[in-house]
Amino acid sequence: VDAGAPAHRTSAEVAARAAYVLRAHDQGALTVAAPRLYPHMWSWDAAFIAIGLARLSPGRALAELETLFGAQWRTGMVPHIVFADTIHDYVPGPDRWRCQQVCTDAPRTRATSGLIQPPVHAIAVRRILEATRYATPAERRQVTLRIRLLWPRLLAWHRYLAEQRDPGSSGLVTIYHSWESGMDNSPRWDGPYAAVRPGPGLPPYRRADLSALGESRQRPSDAEYDRYLWLVEELRAARYDDAAAARTLSFRVGDVFMSAIFAAANEELAAIGDELGLGATGELLEYADRYRKGVVGTAGDDGFAADIDLRTEQAVPAPTIAGFAPLICGGLDAPRQRALVELLEGPQWCGNPSLAFAVPPSTRPGAEGFDPGRYWRGPQWPPMNWLLAWGLERCGEPAAAARLRAATSAQLADGLFAEYYEPFTGRPLGAQPQSWSAAVALDLLA
Ligand code: 9YW
């Protein structure tokens, strides 16, 4: 896709370009997140990519998730990176994770990371199932059969999250690393990361991301990267064992955004199980209820939610997009839901008159830690907009959902599918094109 594209293209043109991008990034049964910066499969990217691909081919969309779940660990954990066979120019690569060497639960056939990412997958499977309504009867039969085959793995994933990542049934999913949240350097993590002190045992590493992107001011700092890599050392030393990790890691946070996605995903999975007569509905709805309550329990009078630092048992309120978690899982009483939607659409967030597009910056402009050009500290991320719009629709806010979808589509009408966008200038930043941005465009415009 060429740079310097005209600002406005027709929806059909943007959708066609998005389809072209996904095709170009397709390695057969795996779509790389972005060829240069992220030449592998990422877990929640794969779910968003499947949501986009469902518009083109439900069968190919499901293949994406089959590949991801093919690398599932024996514990049920779905790894946050599945390494593509061919390219190893990513840091940290398999040699640093050493999952197969130190943990018998890791899959034998695929190199993976030893972390997780938010469980958007069941949401994607439900969209694929819905997309088969427009497919031929033969394709519908075939895809439905494959969803049945995938079912035990989906269930094992959700059970892993509920049992291993929340052994006390608190209603919040524990993360061991900010990479697990998907929002690496968000100001959400500044507090908890103060307790992560990289030791002299941190082996040297290369910032492959900086050479791939060329612009270090868009990426996390070296000090942050030291912490990221240090936590990998800690996790590997714990042999990726959840009980050991819970005792020894210097980063453990109850992630409110991940938990909201998990609550909603449980409902989606229950609906799939219901439709296909697969059972487990009661268990899944119980999880949905538990995590919805967990998220809502952290919210203030304005409905804005906060993560919990599990090492100090303190809430860590932060002015980031994750505070809108209750709009993804629902469950707020009517006045607080109204207040939260008004906050989202008001002058501090989407209604900020300085924004190029009325979509939420990853961090509130002007807040401490805000940086309009740096990754999760300010730029706008198309898949996050998609998720919030999807959640708004589900929790009975169709007008706000429609406004967010329209603004997201307008931003993506440049046809560049940037990884993220500078909120004031609208400048496309990060990897270009990025698969999940193209996927979201495809879903919104096809
Ligand atoms: C990295 C692939 C991933 C996303 C994450 C995002 C980034 C990878 O890219 O992390 O090396 O920093 O933070 O959410 O899944 O798109």
Image (cartoon, grey):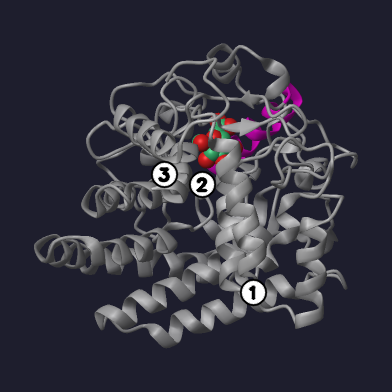
Residue 149 is one of the magenta-drawn residues? no
Do the residues bearing badges 3 and 1 touch, measured as CB atoms within 8 Å?
no
Q: Which residue is mark 3?
A: 442
Q: From the viewer's perspective, is the residue at label 3 or at label 1 nearer? A: 3
The secondary structure making up most of the magenta span is: helix
Secondary structure beneath dot 1 equals: loop
Q: Position of residue 100 (x, y in %)?
A: 36, 40
Marks 1 and 2, how far apart at CA: 27 Å
| Residues rendered magenta in the picture | 221-236
Residue 223 is one of the magenta-drawn residues? yes
Secondary structure beneath dot 3 equals: helix
Side of 337 relative to 66 (left or right): right
Q: Position of residue 411 (x, y in %)?
A: 60, 37
Q: Which residue is mark 1?
A: 330
Tell whether circle 1 marks a residue whose Cβ is less than 8 angstroms from ligand 1: no
Q: Crowding at label 1, few (<14), some or many (≥20) Cα neighbours within 10 Å?
A: many
Ligand 1 sits in quadrant = top right
* Image quarter in which the N terminus is found: top left
Amino acid type, label 3: Leu
Marks 3 and 1, how far apart at CA: 26 Å
Q: Is residue 80 visible?
A: no
Quadrant of residue 153 in the image?
bottom left
In percent of the image, x 59 and y 45: which residue is there?
408
Q: Which residue is mark 2?
A: 115
> Of callouts 1 and 2, which one flags the residue occurring earlier in the amino acid sequence?
2
